[in-house]
């Protein structure tokens, strides 16, 4: 698993870490029951606080993406296909919402935004 963190980003480090782990799970890059790096090893590798990694792992567990077995480690949770599909949809919806918010902030109307989406969809 390759994690790239942007210290200049306005997104907190733990959220960046969570998003990348989630994406790896959703895309199948991390398989069910696969062990994640230990908190200590990942914090050392990324040169961030162990508390930051722990916070990300705890939040991922709250959302049902991972399971922590005390003394053994953190593992990708067994997921059902419907839950994985819903998580993918949510990720795409969040991306669209951010793009719409950005477009609205610079003065685009609903019709302007729809026109852009239609133009982009022509390529697919």
Image (cartoon, grey):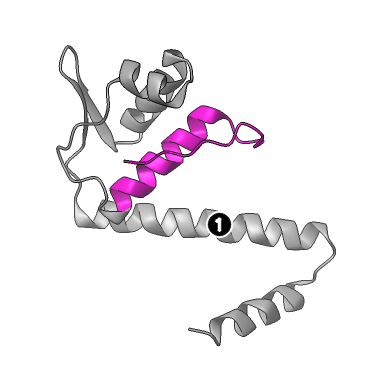
- The local secondary structure at tag 1 comes to helix
Q: According to the image, label 1 marks what residue?
A: 95
Give left or right: position of 108 versus 31. Answer: right
- Which quadrant would the N terminus be assigned to in this image? top left
Residue under the point 31% across and 29% down: 61
Residue nearest the observer in this picture, 9 or 116:
9
Residue under the point 20% across and 37% down: 77
How far across and down, in percent of the image, does residue 3 sit?
42, 38
Based on the picture, tell me whether residue 13 belongs to the magenta stretch: yes
How far across and down, in percent of the image, does residue 106 sit?
83, 60
How far across and down, in percent of the image, does residue 62 sit?
34, 29
Residue under the point 48% across and 83% down: 124
Give left or right: position of 39 versus 46. Answer: left
Q: What segment is highlighted magenta in the picture? A: 1-26
Badge 1: residue crowd in 10 Å (few <14, some 14–19, many ≥20): few
Based on the picture, tell me whether residue 115 belongs to the magenta stretch: no
């Amino acid at each position: 698993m390759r994690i790239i963190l942007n210290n200049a980003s306005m997104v907190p480090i733990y959220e960046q870490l969570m998003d990348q782990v989630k994406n790896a799970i959703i895309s199948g890059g991390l398989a069910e029951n696969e062990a994640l790096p230990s908190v200590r090893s990942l914090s050392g590798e990324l040169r961030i606080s162990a508390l930051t990694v722990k916070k990300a792992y705890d939040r991922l567990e709250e959302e049902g993406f991972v399971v922590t077995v005390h003394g053994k480690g953190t593992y990708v949770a067994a997921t059902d296909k419907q839950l994985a599909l819903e998580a993918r949809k949510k990720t795409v919806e969040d991306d669209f919402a951010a793009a719409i918010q950005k477009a609205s902030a610079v003065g685009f109307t609903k019709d302007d935004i729809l026109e852009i989406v239609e133009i982009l969809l022509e390529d697919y």
